[in-house]
Amino acid sequence: MGLTSPGGGARRHVASLDDEAETSEEDLWFLPGPDAEEEDAPPGAPPLPYATRTHLFDLKIWHQAQGDLSGELARLTQIFGELDARLREGPEGLRHRLALREITDLSWWTGDRLPQDRLGLWVALRIGSTSETEQALGQAGWAFRRLTAGPPDAQDLAAFLERPTAETEVSQMGADAGAIADLRELLANGVALHPVTQAAVLFHAWRMIGAPHSRDIEAAILAARHGASMSRRPGQGALFLPLSATGPTAFRGAGDPARKLAAWIAGAEQATLGALLQLERLAVWKSATLRVVGDLSGRTAARLVEVFAAWPMVAAPLAEAETGASRAAVQRNLDLLTERGLIREITGQGRYRVWTATT
């Protein structure tokens, strides 16, 4: 029987260690990955190559694109300035009228396709909702409030978007707690950009990180309100930059920032011109209507024309308050204006009726 020497086991162990030292790294796939501190890898990362972190929006590229489009940007600023001045001198109802059209056209881009009359009834009287349109009208109501009143988005993004701030509320609603913080940081880093360019960045950023069920309309309203910060007197004239009144051109920009910004400026220019044309048509309607009602006795009819020029949807109580006339005089003149085709009733009901100008 052969016997081994006392040191034989030790020699065999040393030899096995030498064999392991010569084993290639590819054969050691089952071992832990590199040390996180030495390789700057995130904790728990697998032993695989990972991409370096980069910013989703390189604001230097957006700044360069803005410089290349300075002429187009200047033209849009001038057109918006004209709209801002007209709204600053006109009644508050003009802003409501433009906001209703903006949201109506925006709803076609989001797929909700809300008629303007139906949206107006919901905003004014909270009627006309069904189970199929409840969510869409709820979002449209939020959009109308944000386009016609309230502080701009930059003051408090969470409040503007009606998002919870407490961590417990965030977890209960399932919202991304970091999305608003990321958007706030992006806005702060882009302070040197023109408000129109900032609005484009906000729009595309929120469409990427916002809640899927509402990010499209929220992104558009965020951008519209932010774009209006280029006003000489913010909050006194145009509260939002029109973006969708003539189609979703502004939202269809794709590719690099230069293409996105070019589409954004072109779409905003078309929509702003559309808003100016709407105000012009309303002024023509008002002038022609005043001539048509010149044969009517009293001042109620002329005062009603002023009311319909200022407000997109008019109910009898509003007409009474604005004209100072009695209920009987208001109702009689509403019937006369309807008979002459100057206004039309849009509810089709016998009670709680609402009229709008036939512009």
Image: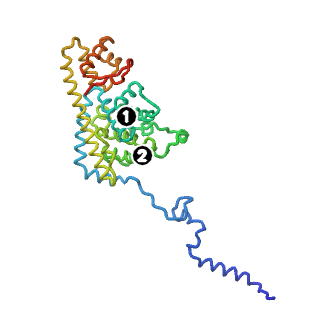
**For mark 1, what is the residue?**
114
Question: Is 31 on the left-hand or right-hand side of 95?
Answer: right
Residue 59 at x, y = what percent? 35, 52
Please tell me how crowded label 1 is: few (under 14), some (14-19), or many (20+) other residues with Cα within 10 Å.
some
Query: In the rendered structure, which amino acid carries the disc numbered 1?
Result: Leu
Indicate the secondary structure of the residue bearing disc 1: loop
Q: Is residue 318 depicted above or below 222 in this figure?
A: above
Q: How far apart are marks 1 and 2 (CA)?
A: 29 Å
Q: Which of the 4 image quadrants contains residue 90?
A: top left
Could you tell me if the residues under marks 1 and 2 are in contact, i.e. CB atoms within 8 Å? Answer: no
- Viewer-nearest residue: 266 or 9: 266
Question: Could you tell which of marks 1 and 2 lies nearer the N-terminus?
Answer: 1
Residue 186 at x, y = what percent? 40, 48
Name the residue: 60% across, 77% down: 21
Query: In the rendered structure, which amino acid carries the disc numbered 2?
Result: Leu
Name the residue: 77% across, 86% down: 4
Q: Residue furthest right?
A: 1
Residue 42 at x, y = what percent? 53, 59
* Residue 129 seen: yes
In the rendered image, the quadrant that contains the N terminus is: bottom right
Please tell me how crowded label 2 is: few (under 14), some (14-19), or many (20+) other residues with Cα within 10 Å.
some
Q: Residue furthest bottom?
A: 2
Name the residue: 22% across, 26% down: 285
In the rendered image, the quadrant that contains the C terminus is: top left
* Residue 60 seen: no
Q: Is residue 318 depicted above or below 14 in this figure?
A: above
- Viewer-nearest residue: 40 or 20: 20
Q: Which of the 4 image quadrants contains residue 27?
A: bottom right
Q: Is residue 256 depicted above or below 311 in this figure?
A: below
Indicate the secondary structure of the residue bearing disc 2: helix
**For mark 2, what is the residue?**
183
Question: Is 16 on the left-hand or right-hand side of 92?
Answer: right
